[in-house]
Image (spheres, rainbow, N blue to C red):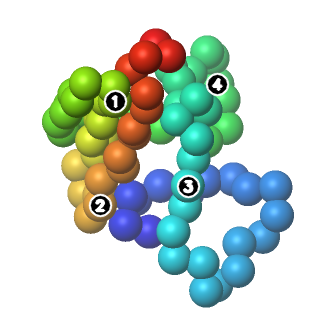
Amino acid sequence: MAWGIRLKTAEPVPDDVAYLAVRASFIAAPEGSVENCFDCSIVRVVDSRFERNVILKPSADAGATIQWRFNMVDH
């Protein structure tokens, strides 16, 4: 658990799964108590002409970061 968090999934995750993908449109500020919500810090924001890449760190002791990349034209 490089992020230091646990996520609830609809199906069991096989032991050989090494990566997780989440659509950028599913990342949002929580409204009330919601499953799979966690605090994180913004490490860096990188803008290009059409895209924004936000690097998040979910906890102080997390060994890995989360990259939230989305199309700036749609936002």
Viewer-nearest residue: 64 or 55: 55
Task: Report the side of 12 relative to 48 (left or right).
Answer: right
Q: Which residue is mark 1?
A: 51
Residue closer to the observer: 6 or 23: 23
Q: Nearer the viewer, mark 2 or mark 4?
A: 2
Distance between mark 2 and mark 4 Cα atoms:
25 Å
Q: Quadrant of residue 40?
A: top left
Do the residues bearing badges 2 and 4 touch, measured as CB atoms within 8 Å?
A: no
Q: Is residue 38 above or below residue 71?
A: below
List x then y, in percent, for residue 9.
73, 56
The reply to whether dot 3 and dot 4 touch (C-beta < 8 Å) is: no
User: First in sequence: mark 2 or mark 4?
Assistant: 4
Nearest to the eye among marks 2 and 1: give it. Answer: 1
Kindly report which numbered mark, 2 or 3, lies closer to the viewer in this rendering.
3
Q: Taking 5 as reference, is 73 above or below it?
A: above
Q: Which residue is mark 4?
A: 33
The answer, for residue 1, to whether it is visible in the render is yes
Q: Residues within 10 Å of mark 2 (few under 14, many from 20)?
A: some
